[in-house]
Amino acid sequence: MNLTLYLLTVLIWGTTWIAIKFQIESVAIPLSIAYRFALAALVLFLILIPTRRLQPLDQRGQLFCMAQGVCLFCLNFICFYSASQYIASGLIAVVFSTATLWNALNARLWFKQAIAANVLAGGALGLLGLALLFWPELGSHTASHETWLGLGLSLLGTLCFSAGNMISSLQQRVGIRPLTSNAWGMLYGALILLVICLVQGVPFTVDLSTRYISSLVYLAVPGSVIGFTAYLTLVGRLGAERAAYCTVLFPVVALNISAWMEGYQWTWPALFGLALVLLGNILVFRKPKGSSTLLKPTTSMGR
């Protein structure tokens, strides 16, 4: 089951990059993100309420979901979308793939969890592999003011994503399941983004073209409802550092889509990089002897 969730996350999130490109052409970035998560939250509530699967939450639970919404469904997307205006998408993907290491460090800080040597080794191999995969973009990039701004935004987005992972771990420890936390978190994220748009005076426009609407639906339902639910379920089952290795693999999927739709050319260094990513994946998933699954739900909240 974990392998199915893992592959599902990699395949879905690996295909969202091409859809995101269609979202930033005609509508302001925060507004497009707000549309995405408002639609995703609506879908989740329409599924959970009639089936009575929406968990009742107390004030503490709602605060958890609001914090998750800020980190996972608001700030990190603003950072990455904005960074794409300054640096190449491949470079952003490399920065984002460091989520594996940030999650391991944050798990140590938040939960006193030891950092396994195989996690660090696998993450390092994955980063090296991605560097080879995106070497043309990395090697040709000049260190201008815009470059540093893009790198800073990418790093901030990755840190927000990692913080959201820790919050999800806390939620699942107290019995809040990902479907419920995602529904509320996406709603809070969308509302915060709409407030940002109002404060900034962003015009509330809608692109009714087939390309924009179809990409919006894809990002909202498979990309958000299914993708985040599968990923955060893995966070609860495997721990944040192992679940985050999805972030190392999905750029590989995106690269293959780019080869099909955008004419990307595979090279021998790129193929070697892919091999390193896969080897790193094997290392991360090797369970140390005597270890146990961390962050299982322990108590119920709001029941």
Image (cartoon, grey):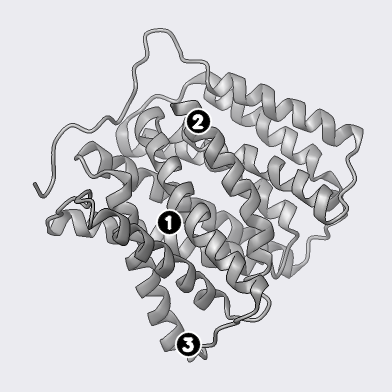
Residue that sits furthest to the left in the current view: 303
Q: Where does residue 104 sit, x and y in percent of width and height?
A: 46, 34
The residue nearer to you, when weighing 167 against 232, is 232
Report the residue marked by disc 2: 4
Report the residue marked by disc 1: 72
Labelled disc at residue 197: none
Label 1: element kind: helix
Q: What kind of residue is marked 1? A: Leu
Residue 52 shows in this picture: yes
Measuring 62% from the left and 71% from the top, which residue is drawn there? Answer: 23
Examine the image and state in which quarter residue 301 appears.
top left
Q: What kind of residue is marked 3? A: Gln
Q: Are marks 3 and 2 in contact (CB under 8 Å)?
A: no
Examine the image and state in which quarter residue 28 appears.
bottom right
Q: Is residue 175 left or right of residue 292?
A: left
Measuring 41% from the left and 79% from the top, which residue is drawn there? Answer: 194
Report the residue marked by disc 3: 200
- Cα separation, mark 3 vs mark 1, equals 21 Å
Label 2: element kind: helix
Residue 138 shows in this picture: no
